[in-house]
Amino acid sequence: METEKKTIILIGDSSSKRAVFFRKAAQDLGVRLHMVEWESLREDFDLQQFQGAAVKIDPPSYLTVHFTQMQEQLKAYRRNLRYLAQADCQFLNTPEMICQMLHKRETNQRLKEQGIAVTEMFCEQIETVSQLEEMLREKHCYSVFIKPECFSGAAGVAAFRMHPLSGKRKLYTSCRFENGQLVNTKKLVCMENKIEICALLDQLLSLGCVVERWHPKADYHGKSYDLRVVFQFGHIAAIVARQSNGPITNLHLNNQALDVKELDLNESVMEQIALVCKRSYEVCTAYQSEATAFGVSSMTGIDLLLEKGTMRPRVIEINGQGDLIYQDIYRENRIYQEQVRFLAGSSVS
Ligand SMILES: Nc1ncnc2c1ncn2[C@@H]1O[C@H](COP(=O)(O)OP(=O)(O)OP(=O)(O)O)[C@@H](O)[C@H]1O
Ligand SMILES: [Mg+2]
């Protein structure tokens, strides 16, 4: 007997690639989809409309490049997520889970507590360059990543290296100063001027950043890479390698996506990747408050690096909305189809 398909609600931005291809997946499977624009979701929005529905939350599209505005928008986003959490519906990823996973420190800590290999994040709260440099000397660790705690899309991510003896410094980042303000760009630059580096880092650190050891990444044909794994409903749905000439591999920074098969990773490395992802997914799904009502299922976008030499996987971070994979949407669109099937109910084939 056919059970009735649920209506799916997608909260997002209807002109985004995410929305276009999620809608396509629903259409191809004959499932009704109702779109709710982020813009219409204010605190007076009637959550009754969500009652009993299956809801997916996409991130809002940020138009600003100014970090202070991005911070404001992030605050508003978190407020909206908290409001959405009151809705009586089934979420793909709950607003609470998405909110929690915006925090790089907390996620890193949780994974580490469960014995999962993660990038080494320092517990110190670093707010100035002098604190940073003091810490690097104390730890004898002179190459680090500095990342705003809750931003995404490589915004504000910086790779910093300081020579312990000569004091020479290098900073790789795609953010820069413009009229006294920090702005995000899509171009990675390498800075070498100490005064400029310190001025930029002081601003960046004042936003609230995490500092991590810079782990050298495995390379392929002379370029380093990391992996984005979409792990959903208990299995790997896609893996993409992101290859770069620089230390930051995010794809919108002119980096190249690569089919993981081309890397020709051996079986044992692939097994380790699968295991680390499975365990990370389990830790993240424990965030889901409705886990018992709807089964432990959700989607995670896991960034991981393979350590140069040992090829040991380490989780860099996990995104609660990291499911946009161009290689998938432009081909079979399997990731979104699978989500539609899950949300609409098992009768959809
Ligand atoms: N500790 C580290 N060691 C080496 N490389 C790192 C480290 N942390 C981050 N990176 C590199 O920087 C990139 C961006 O870092 P991260 O994923 O934490 O930022 P993000 O802004 O949240 O990115 P997105 O939201 O697009 O996934 C990673 O994909 C990786 O290439
Ligand atoms: Mg990332």
Image (spheres, rainbow, N blue to C red):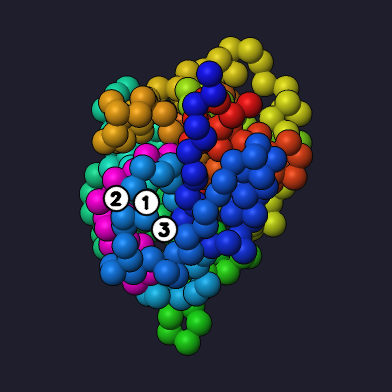
Is residue 252 rendered to the left or right of residue 261? left
Q: Secondary structure at mark 2?
A: loop
Q: Residue furthest front?
A: 1
Identified by mark 3, the residue type is Phe
Which circle, 3 or 1, is nearer the viewer?
1
Q: Residue at x 48, y 78 (%)?
A: 177
Q: Residue furthest bottom?
A: 179
From this view, report whether residue 252 is shown above or below residue 332.
below
The residue at which mark 3 appears reads as 151
For the residues labelled 2 and 1, say whether their Cβ atoms are less than 8 Å apart.
yes
For the residues labelled 3 and 2, say whether their Cβ atoms are less than 8 Å apart.
no
Q: How many marks?
A: 3
Q: Is mark 3 within 8 Å of ligand 1?
A: yes
Q: Residue at x 27, y 55 (%)?
A: 82
The residue at which mark 1 appears reads as 50
Label 2: few (<14), some (14–19) or many (≥20) C-alpha neighbours in 10 Å? some
In percent of width and height, residue 8 lies at 49, 45
Label 1: few (<14), some (14–19) or many (≥20) C-alpha neighbours in 10 Å? some
- Magenta highlight on residue 75: yes
* Residue 97 appears anywhere in the view: yes
The answer to which quarter of the image holds residue 327 is top right
Measure the C-alpha gap from mark 3 to mark 1: 28 Å
- Magenta stretch, main secondary structure class: helix
Which segment is the magenta one? Answer: 71-92
Label 3: few (<14), some (14–19) or many (≥20) C-alpha neighbours in 10 Å? some
The residue at which mark 2 appears reads as 87
